[in-house]
Amino acid sequence: LRRFATVVLHKAISRGEVLALNDRLYHGKYKLCVDDCQPNNPAHVRTLCPRLRGANKFCRWANLRYVDKPCDFMHPRHALPTLNASFRLERVDLRSAKGEDLVSHFMQSAPFHNGMPRVVDISQIINPV
């Protein structure tokens, strides 16, 4: 299970402190992954995004069209393996075993802060390779 949070520090920390944070466990059991984004660093404009060079070849910030925070690194089209990916949505019947399983798991993820939601539709993504 992955959790994601963004923290902007008001004061820069050293590379050693970043590496030390990566070695710590949050609440004694969750591994931290600290990303030193260095916003507005002019050197990044000429450098291929390190996330695209990594194992996943995926940059969350570029793929989300910079909603969370911008990624200052280069994202050339040839380095984006999912750029031309195709997919289709297929409806999941809410009364099917899969539909009931998804709805019950969602409803168990409470508490909901402003009432009780009602699931009205579920679609699965079909991504042919």
Image (tube, rainbow, N blue to C red):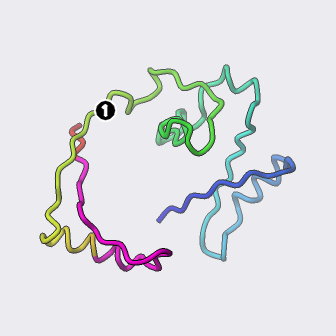
Residue 69 location, quadrant = top right
- Residue with the mark numbered 1: 85
Which residue corresponds to the image point at 85% horizontal and 50% vertical from the top-left? 13
- Tell me residue 70's x, y (percent): 62, 36
Quadrant of the image containing the C terminus? top left
- Tell me residue 11's x, y (percent): 87, 50
Which residue corresponds to the image point at 37% horizontal and 80% vertical from the top-left? 108
- Tell me residue 2's x, y (percent): 50, 62
Which residue corresponds to the image point at 51% horizontal and 21% vertical from the top-left? 76
Q: Is residue 34 magenta?
A: no
The answer to which of 95 and 120 lies nearer the viewer is 120
Residue type indicated by callout 1: Ala
Find the magenta span and give its range: 104-125
* Label tally: 1
Q: Is residue 120 magenta?
A: yes
Q: Is residue 64 above or below residue 74?
A: below
Of all residues, the one furthest to the front in this rendering is 114
